[in-house]
Image: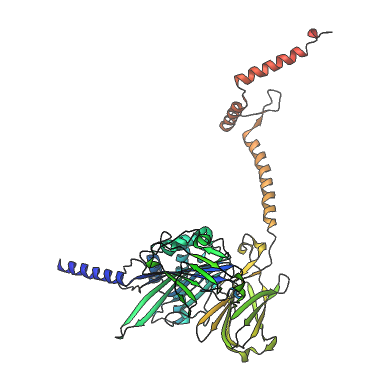
Amino acid sequence: MDHLRTLLVLLLLVVCCTFASEQFSEELLLRPLPDSKLLAHFEFTFEAPWPNNNSADHYRLLPRSMVRIIKRYQVNEMHLSFTQGRWMYSKWGLPTIPAPPGSELWAYFMPQNNTTPEEQQERVTELWRGASTTLSGLYCASLGQLKTTATCSPSRSFNPQGKVYNNNMMRYGVLPREGVCTENLTPWLKQLPCGDHSGIGALLNPIRLYDVHWHSLGIHTTKLIKYDSDGKLTQKLILKQTLSVILDRTQEWTLNSLFAVQSISACPLAHHSVIKIEKFPNTLKLRPTTDYNEADNLFTYDLKNKSSFSLRAKDVSPAAESRDPKSPLDINRYITGNGLEFGGISTKIHNYQNKTVSITYMDMLPWFIRIYFHTMKIYINDVNVDPYKELTHWVMRPAEVRKSTNLIEFSMNIPASSSVLVTVQFEKAFLHWTEHPPDANRGFDLGSAVVTVHDDVKEYRVYSEALLVSLPTPDFSMPYNVITLTGTVFALFFGAAYNLLIRRPDKSGGNNEYVSNRPIARIIRMILSFIDTPTEKEATEEEKEKNIQSESNDPSESTH
């Protein structure tokens, strides 16, 4: 009995300590953009102790569904996004969290000791499949299609935000054709402590969030390792749920005009709840007024100190929008060539900064695009350069048919105010007719290329647009023609066989009617007689019509 009491006390202490160490914060950033656009970036952050496989984990705020995925599939770091539209780097600058069109997932897994590299890769592949399939069911997506034919392992393009992990334990996958809708948003909202009932989450109106120019939904988990002043190691789990949209704004805008919500209050479970508004243009006036941080160029409203909050902003001088928030780096990609057999991909990277930048270019292409790696050329300011001299790192990995993807990854330095053009040729493969999508004539989507900028201040990524390539398509009308012809022949054969099996000619009556005493024929005749037998009223009316007709035809009653 004493042992049971001791166990219960220890369990209670663990639960209390875990609850006390959990934190939840919510934040909304509003950034006015040129062309009467507005960026609304929602960020909900959970901070909790890292789940340990050897002990029970008790969480009050952290979504348990994500904890189960982290523990079962041994995830160290994971980033998932669902994006609709393309971010305009030349007009809107850099996004808060970059993401390509469609769905993107990349994750680092925990290593296992005493295993060979081949066993380690097989283990990571199984963990990747399990995690992607589970996330697919959790967020109502198609992530289960992220198999080896849509996955790669880049070495320098996606560096972890937490601890430095082994890149061999990393997987990256993208589905450029993924549809984004409210089915992805609903489970995402259920993971928030207050949902969409209170706090900043009350602004998440699906009708307004999907009628926008750009929409990006994200889930990010990071393992944060810290050392206390005493040298004690602590591991924390940082989970961020983000949502970014580009809205239309007028000269005077409010929370109601943006999200159809009059006022909001802080979530009771959040220890930090703020709304930040970037000062652009310089003549932006806000009601109610608040403090302005000139260093960050932000107005900040603390919702924890307000029972109800409503906002009204006005651009006194819209002409002040002449400021150009151009991204320091931009990327454009397009298909070259013609025909259905050969083609090419050209990618142009622009460096608008007055300094040399170090970048890593990564492009993952499906197996049915057969890359001719020897045709890759690099031009700096329209001058052809030797790749072996300009590239500081490169990986050229050809695909295996129906097993893996093509991978092009290299690092180089781009001079100040310069542009780099990368071209490569490919051949289009012939697919089996069952491998084509339902709308095969539309073409196949190729994922975005990724440029990772290794800046001294921070590292950020820039994505290109997705591409659409046409492959040789069979004549899908032929199966329908065959089906139609086969159905017609079968119908004619079945009708003739039915008559021979069920009916026989009656020669005694002198007519050509078919009679039969078989049970099926009797049932059919009974049903037909019931359907064809006229009612008493109909029979009376028919007799009257016949009598009238006979009287009209009687010559004796005709008058002269």
**Quadrant, the N terminus:** bottom left
* Residue 140 visible somewhere in the drawing: no
Instruction: Give the image location of residue 138, x and y in percent.
Output: 45, 63
* Residue 330 visible somewhere in the drawing: yes
Image position of 460 (left or right of 334):
left
Report the residue at 70% width, 88% height from top. Answer: 383
Instruction: Give the image location of residue 110, x and y in percent.
Output: 41, 77
Report the residue at 59% width, 31% height from top. Answer: 524
Instruction: Give the image location of residue 305, x and y in percent.
Output: 37, 67
Residue 336, quarter of the rendered image: bottom right
Depth check, front residue: 235 or 479:
235
Q: Number of numbered discs present? A: 0
Depth check, front residue: 91 or 130:
91
User: Is residue 110 placed above or below 242 in the rendered structure?
Assistant: below
User: Is residue 337 placed above or below 475 in the rendered structure?
Assistant: below
Report the residue at 61% width, 64% height from top. Answer: 435
Residue occupying the far right of the picture: 560
Depth check, front residue: 7 or 58:
58
Instruction: Give the image location of residue 145, x and y in percent.
Output: 53, 66
Residue 384, quarter of the rendered image: bottom right
Color encoding of the figure: rainbow
Residue occupying the far bottom of the picture: 389
Residue 102, quarter of the rendered image: bottom right
Depth check, front residue: 256 or 469:
256
**Quadrant, the C terminus:** top right
Image position of 394 (left or right of 552):
left
